[in-house]
Amino acid sequence: MDEIELIYGNYLGISFFFKRCTVKQCNKIQLVFNKIVFDVTTLELEKLQQTIKSTLKTLEQSKHLNLDCNLKDIYVLFKSEKQISFNFQELKAFKNLIDGTVFNLNTVIYSLTSA
């Protein structure tokens, strides 16, 4: 674990960055969620955060869905060519992972710029 810097984690995933990396890797954040690894920039992370927020809002506003059941096959567009499939609970956990990652990154950036 000396090779990575943990950013955030929850019961289904973690986010981190490599301490030692190539130039290409250094501006990427690694998200490991439910056995899937995502390699994203901060801009892609923020876009994904907005996409998931919008998807959850749409699902929660739909009067025809029973969200207590395990709603399956919710597709979220990722990097314009890839779709990821989640059930409702996974999507909420993934949102938590993304929100926590963005929050912690912003906290680190703020502390570095205000020092």
Image (tube, grey):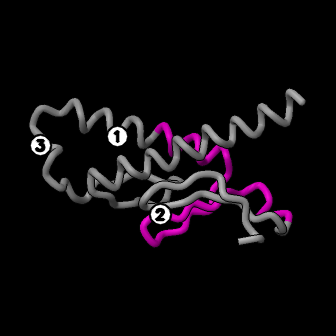
Q: Disc 3 residue type?
A: Asn
Question: Which dot marks residue 66?
Answer: 3
Disc 3 packing (10 Å; few <14; some 14–19; many ≥20): few
Residue 76 spot, x, y in % from top left? 39, 51
Residue 44 spot, x, y in % from top left? 61, 48
- For mark 2, what is the residue? 33
What residue is drawn where x is 32% and y is 39%? Answer: 56
Q: Secondary structure at mark 3?
A: loop
Quarter of the image with the N terminus is: bottom right
| Disc 1 and disc 3 in contact, CB within 8 angstroms | no
Which contiguous range is marked in magenta? 23-50
Residue 91 spot, x, y in % from top left? 35, 51
What residue is drawn where x is 19% and y is 53%? Answer: 71
Give the Cα separation between the discs numbered 2 and 3. 25 Å
Q: Secondary structure at mark 1?
A: helix
Quarter of the image with the C terminus is: top right
Disc 1 packing (10 Å; few <14; some 14–19; many ≥20): some
Q: Disc 2 residue type?
A: Phe
The image shows residue 107, relative to residue 70, as above or below, that is above
- For mark 1, what is the residue? 55
Q: Which mark lies nearer to you, 2 or 1?
A: 2
| Disc 2 and disc 3 in contact, CB within 8 angstroms | no
Is residue 43 found inside the magenta-colored segment of the image? yes
Q: Earlier in the sequence, mark 2 or mark 1?
A: 2
Give the Cα separation between the discs numbered 2 and 1. 18 Å
Asked where in the image residue 83 lies, by quadrant, the reply is bottom left
Residue 7 left/right relative to 53: right
Q: Nearer the viewer, residue 48 or 98?
A: 98
Q: Earlier in the sequence, mark 2 or mark 3?
A: 2
What residue is drawn where x is 77% and y is 70%? Answer: 2
